[in-house]
Image: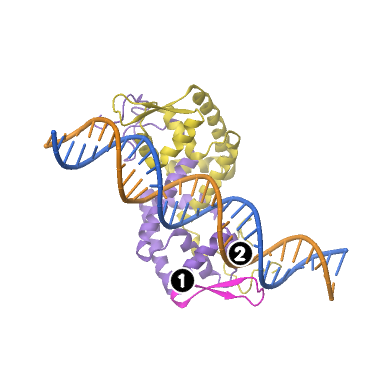
Chain colours: A yellow, B purple, C blue, D orange
Amino acid sequence: MTASATQTAPRKRAGNGAAPREVADDVGLDALVGHAGYAVRRFQIWIFQDFIKTLGEVDIRPTQYSVLTVIGANPGLSQMAVAKRLGIERARLVHLLDSLEQRKLVKRVKSKADRRSHALHLTAPGETALAKFKLLAAEHERHVEAKIGKENRAQLLRILADFT
Amino acid sequence: MTASATQTAPRKRAGNGAAPREVADDVGLDALVGHAGYAVRRFQIWIFQDFIKTLGEVDIRPTQYSVLTVIGANPGLSQMAVAKRLGIERARLVHLLDSLEQRKLVKRVKSKADRRSHALHLTAPGETALAKFKLLAAEHERHVEAKIGKENRAQLLRILADFT
DNA sequence: AAAGATTGTTGTTGACGACAACAATTGTCA
DNA sequence: TGACAATTGTTGTCGTCAACAACAATCTTT
């Protein structure tokens, strides 16, 4: 075994054609294959890393991007509404907005209708910045296509449409 | 609109058929739809929560389950080998194994071939426990089928097979 | 007006990934 | 053979993220 895989790994799953790419040397997963959650988790890690790298030059992470996108499409939303829409806790959104507001991309406007809540808007530089972010996000999306195939990506979006 | 969606949300995306289920009241996502990463993230959250709930009675989380499964299928592996196979850092695996070893599901055996490394094995109760975990995991997998459809799940596994 | 609910905020906890450092051990190669 | 590099498990720190709990300010309801 050239490598030092400790010892008597029972070499199940020997000659079943498609070998696992670069991940493992020889280790079998057996029961783990066929678990949707495991595949989805690994894919999600890959896709986030590519997103972070592709949007690295502008220092925007996936969650930040989703917040900016929703605010851009629905100006005036409250923090509660944004949090609920994106499945983020409002406690978490506070920090996200703190960061985005420091960067002058978003502003919290005190709502007159409900003095508890803030109406969220993009700033002018925030608008132009988001436009650039969307270009980079589209480039990331092309990476996904290159990774899993164009029609596979389309099927995936169709299958998971309900979770959007 | 009955709800208190703060105010003047510009009501784009009005009557396009399939409304978003229970997630939002009325907020449009626009550009976020069509992003694979967003759909995958939401799905992954759903699937993990169902896994955690379904395996809640035995207090096993997805990562713990994957570790037990790999050790069960490949007894004698080193920590390094397990970590590499699952894409976990070996530093993180230390804590996972500490927990699983305290619960008497796994044991670290000092390897004679390489005295730096530990050969990982399931204990006898670990074997029987894993058998039960697999039954519950199969139940969870049926929940996934019920959620997205049987053949959609199969397609998803096929599309993401390379990430396993 | 009083009681209860909602909004934004602060704080804590725990799972998780990324790094860096370290001792013990093994591998290499000059 | 003996010095140097690499590997393995471990410990620790840092930052992200989800889940809660508590709180003051402000609606909403009755």
**Mark 1 Cα-neighbour bin, 10 Å: few <14, some 14–19, many ≥20:** few
Vertical arrangement, residue A73 with respect to residue B84, above or below? above
Please state, as top left, top right, bottom left or bottom right, where the N terminus of chain A lies in the image.
bottom right
Q: Residue at x 47, y 68 (%)?
A: B100
Is residue C5 left or right of B31 when viewed as pictured? left
**Marks 1 and 2, how far apart at CA:** 20 Å
- The total number of labels drawn is 2
Q: Amino acid at mark 2?
A: Met
User: Can residue B58 be spotted in the picture?
Assistant: yes
Q: Quick one: label 1 or label 2, which is nearer the N terminus?
A: 2
Q: Residue at x 33, y 37 (%)?
A: B24
- Give residue C25's position: percent from left, percent from top: 69, 73
Q: Residue at x 33, y 24 (%)?
A: B8
Would you name the residue on which mark 2 appears? B80
**Mark 2 Cα-neighbour bin, 10 Å: few <14, some 14–19, many ≥20:** some
Q: Amino acid at mark 1?
A: Gln
The tag on residue B70 is: none
- Give residue B150's position: percent from left, percent from top: 40, 52
- Give residue A98's position: percent from left, percent from top: 45, 35
Judging from the image, mark 1 belongs to the subunit labelled B
Q: Which residues are magenta?
A: B101-125
Please state, as top left, top right, bottom left or bottom right, where the C terminus of chain A lies in the image.
top left
Would you name the residue on which mark 1 appears? B102
Kindly report which numbered mark, 1 or 2, lies closer to the viewer in this rendering: 1
| Residue B27 among those drawn in magenta | no
Q: Nearer the viewer, residue A153 or B45?
A: B45
> Circle 2 sits in a helix, a strand or a loop, which is it?
helix
